[in-house]
Image (cartoon, helix red, strand yellow):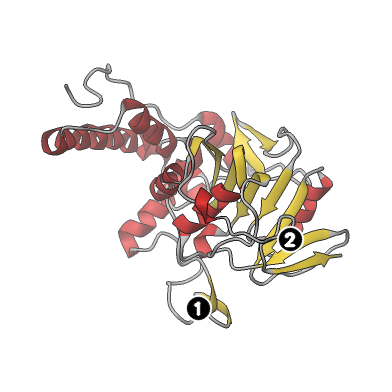
Amino acid sequence: MAAIYARRPAQKSQGPDPGVVQAAMRGSEIRVAGDIQVRSSGRTVGLFASMRRGRLLDVPCGAAEQSRALQRLGFEVVSIDLFPKQSGSGALRIVRADASRSFPLRSATFDYVLSREGIEHLENQAGFVRECARVLRPGGKLVVTTPNVSHLAARLSAFLTGQRNLKRGLVNEVQTLRGRNGSHLYHGHVFLIDYYRMRYILRIAGFERLQVFTDRYSPTSLALAPITPLIKASMRYAAWTAARHNLRKHRSAAPDEVTSEIIRHVTSPALLFGKRMIIVAEKSTGVESPCETADASGASGDLEGGRFSQAS
């Protein structure tokens, strides 16, 4: 058996999508009230607008502005946050809880889970994703948005300074720790996560059908677009050498579809140039998640203890 890519004809390296570069240079960013905007096929579209309405968990929700917006779009929304900030008008169900620990919610009760700019603040990211899988119904969707640390400008920053995002300062115990609530800590952007780790913890938690988007592009990354063919060639070479090594040492290698998906995502305009990584993943309907047995007993309704408030 040859290496993964030995059976495939060599492909000509493709440069960045001209439409992506042109749209970003124009500063085009269309915002539709109440939805998360993503770039798709050169257009800006609402992510939730085309989804069937259902029960949605927003965690962590912060000031719950996104929760209220999705509620206005027709979703039945429950929100979780360690430091909930109630604002706006209209009834909204808010649970005071630590998103890095077990959710005080019953299993398989939501059609969607949204984590908007939250996972980079959490110590136990794998546990968080498992909890998202637990409360989702089979076939339900998880939407995660987080700063993209894989775009070209972030890679250059990591090469020069060892840190991929310098806008919030160097990570330290003075600036990065945002708050305390007893034993609960609220961290800043200390746990920034790249695509590889995000994909890994999603897959082992039972998610499939991953899609990757962004909502806007980094001008600095676009200026580095000429090196895109080198990035793509490097990815193919890395996959080939890894396959050879694993075949020699372990008599196995990652299936073609796994490696192909990773390369396709990592070399996509969304991850090469996007400021934000937006991932949509679907909970598998055929395999039980490792966290399915974590459901506690003795609860009423959706809640399993925890503090519940009705925001208005």
Q: Are marks 1 and 2 in contact (CB under 8 Å)?
A: no
Category of crowding for the residue at label 2, using alpha-carbon neighbours closer than 10 angstroms: few (below 14), some (14–19), many (at least 20): many
Residue 29 percent coordinates (x, y): 67, 43
Q: Is residue 81 above or below residue 236?
A: below
Q: Residue furthest front?
A: 298
Category of crowding for the residue at label 1, using alpha-carbon neighbours closer than 10 angstroms: few (below 14), some (14–19), many (at least 20): few
Mark nearer the N terminus (1 vs 2): 2
- In the image, 74 versus 25, the foreground residue is 74
Residue 109 percent coordinates (x, y): 67, 47
Q: CA distance from mark 1 to mark 2?
A: 24 Å
Q: Would you say residue 148 is visible in this rendering? A: yes
SS assignment at label 1: loop
Question: What is the three-letter code of the residue carrying label 1?
Answer: Gln
- Which residue is painted at 59% across and 57% down in the image? 117
- Which residue is painted at 57% across and 55% down in the image? 295
Residue 114 percent coordinates (x, y): 63, 50
- In the image, 75 versus 188, the foreground residue is 75
Quarter-of-image position of residue 118: bottom right
Q: Is residue 169 above or below residue 150?
A: below
Q: Which residue is disc 2 drawn over?
A: 64
Question: What is the three-letter code of the residue carrying label 2?
Answer: Ala
- Which residue is painted at 67% across and 54% down in the image? 58
Quarter-of-image position of residue 2: top left
Q: Quadrant of the C terminus?
A: bottom right
Q: Residue furthest left?
A: 248
SS assignment at label 2: loop
Q: Which residue is disc 1 drawn over?
A: 175
Q: Is 7 on the left-hand or right-hand side of 122? A: left
